[in-house]
Amino acid sequence: MEPHPHAAARALVFLSLALLAHGKPGDLNRDSFPKGFVFGTASSAYQVEGNALKYGRGPCIWDTFLKFPGATPDNATANVTVDEYHRYMDDVDNMVRVGFDAYRFSISWSRIFPSGIGRINKDGVDYYHRLINYMLANKITPYVVLYHYDLPEVLNNQYNGWLSPRVVSDFGNFADFCFKTYGDRVKNWFTINEPRMMASHGYGDGFFAPGRCTGCRFGGNSATEPYITGHHLLLSHAAAVKIYRDKYQAAQKGKIGILLDFVWYEPYNYTIEDEYAAHRAREFTLGWFLHPITYGHYPETMQKIVGDRLPSFSPEQTALVQGSADYIGINHYTSYYVKHYVNLTHMSYANDWQAKISYDRNGVLIGKQAFSNWLYVVPWGFYKAVMHVKDKFRNPVIVIGENGIDQAGNDTLPHALYDHFRIDYFDQYLHELKRAIDDGARVVGYFAWSLLDNFEWRMGFTSKFGLVYVDRKTFTRYPKDSTRWFRKMIKNEE
Ligand SMILES: *[C@@H]1O[C@H](CO)[C@@H](O)[C@H](O)[C@H]1NC(C)=O
Ligand SMILES: *[C@@H]1O[C@H](CO)[C@@H](O)[C@H](O)[C@H]1NC(C)=O
Ligand SMILES: *[C@@H]1O[C@H](CO)[C@@H](O)[C@H](O)[C@H]1NC(C)=O
Ligand SMILES: *[C@@H]1O[C@H](CO)[C@@H](O)[C@H](O)[C@H]1NC(C)=O
Ligand SMILES: *[C@@H]1O[C@H](CO)[C@@H](O)[C@H](O)[C@H]1NC(C)=O
């Protein structure tokens, strides 16, 4: 039977009213977010600058790590990557075209201090002057990260880098130099990006440089070193914040915080056992760093399980660490299910969670898989993650420091530009972010990862997160369809 024409028309009217009332994917715009909300993209020095061994830059731990064949599936290095060092103007111009307000980039410590301390490399210092000045001339606000995985190799050789308390004053010295040199123009700082990833992958499973773990070729101890390095990362962060607050903040009037990665962990079964397992997973990742920053000590569940392998804070250190952030950066991509699981084979950071993650429940994936097998599209998990930060950590000011989705590195032109799966991801995730803001989360900015297809660490160039495609031979930039979606959303225009 044909539907009655009037019934169809009525249904249409009803449908559009319903969509107006409840919102639909695609209807976000700048006015959906609070006044002054910042939209930007994020990158890191090592992944985009290239010229790793040029213009006076000293090597970092990743340059050494990548010399071992098989470190990346395509044997890639970051020697050249996307050459932002020379092409930063193209990149800033693309940000302006889309309508972004800000760019989150990191400063390569060994480009400024090739040996970590001591001699300063003027070429490196000048590069960041050029980048910052060009951004400001184009009304792109810098959000500057002091450390994104790239420890100067010399410090690793001299005293085992993050394993030694000596790193704290060396990092403080580098931070001080950056505040003094760039702080007249940079008003938004982050000390360290994802200390959890550094500590757990650098020293827990050897997946990241410097590649240490129990049984790893570079040595290590997965039961102790992640906690020691985590402790020094926190103390280094706090030392840099103290320097900023004591010497620069009053005059420069900027803000400083830290960037923490946070996967949302959902209980596999809604049983007490799995609820606790999910709780532990959150505490061993986000809580490891945000709990001390908020409350002055490590989470109780970590103290209980890790015991005396977990360093403790002296009263002076507690005073330094607690409250050491004007805002909290949260990097979020995905969510996993978590089951209670005790693995007694080896004592390690990973087994201390007493939990096992699962990408599916009863064979049903938690969300659609992206190109990477660790990334599933779970928009509701973003809402839960942001609300968790709000509810459990005294409602801090939050900046979303990273969020994005990848496609295969061998996806070529022109197909690689038709990234509708990425538009769907951003649209759904930003709807969930808006929902969290409407429910009281104090989120003031959002940075998509990433402007460009770039060097993705252990994935080399086999995974692309960019809004802009980069031809690997000519370095020409080609904006993908997702840039048009952002433009429409940010500028309220086609
Ligand atoms: C990477 O390098 C190793 C050692 O030189 C070689 O065996 C392997 O085939 C290379 N892989 C690729 C994808 O080129
Ligand atoms: C990258 O630089 C390293 C020096 O650290 C060198 O050994 C390697 O051959 C370079 N790789 C390429 C592909 O240029
Ligand atoms: C948890 O879920 C799995 C899969 O559905 C099921 O086999 C198991 O019995 C559940 N466990 C509990 C304690 O409910
Ligand atoms: C138990 O821990 C060991 C050592 O970390 C690991 O190799 C193994 O995969 C774990 N087993 C399970 C089932 O997770
Ligand atoms: C692209 O790369 C993926 C793995 O990264 C591989 O499975 C696939 O076969 C490649 N496709 C082409 C056309 O080379």
Image (cartoon, helix red, strand yellow):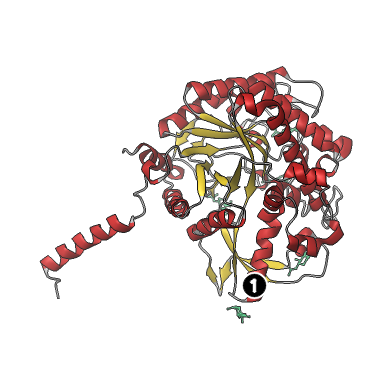
* Residue 428, horizontal then vertical, whole percent: 43, 54
Q: Secondary structure at mark 1?
A: helix
Pinpoint residue 170: horizontal percent, then vertical percent.
80, 32
Picture quadrant where residue 449 is located:
top right
Describe residue 18's horizontal placement relative to residue 345 as left or right. left
Residue visible at 47% across and 33% down in the picture:
101
Residue at point 41% right, 30% down?
97
Residue at 55%, 25% in the rendered image: 87
The residue that label 1 is drawn on is 274
**Which quadrant of the figure has residue 274?**
bottom right
Q: Residues within 10 Å of mark 1 (few under 14, many from 20)?
A: many
Identify the residue shown where x is 54% and y is 40%: 453
User: Going by the image, does 92 lie left or right of 310?
Assistant: left
Q: Is residue 50 above or below residue 285?
A: above
Q: In the rendered image, is residue 53 in sight? A: no
Q: Which is more toward the observer, 183 or 91?
A: 183
Q: Position of residue 84 (x, y in %)?
A: 58, 28
Q: How many marks?
A: 1
Mark 1 C-beta closer than 8 Å to ligand 3: yes
178 in relation to 263, above or below: above
User: Residue 263, position in %: x, y?
Assistant: 60, 56
Q: Is residue 28 above or below residue 156?
A: below
Amino acid carrying mark 1 in the image: Asp
Q: Nearer the viewer, residue 355 or 483?
A: 355
Ligand 4 image position (quadrant): bottom right
Of the 4 image quadrants, the one containing the C terminus is top left
| Residue 160 visible in image | yes
Quadrant showing the N terminus: bottom left
> In this view of the protein, which residue sits in the foreground, 404 or 370?
404
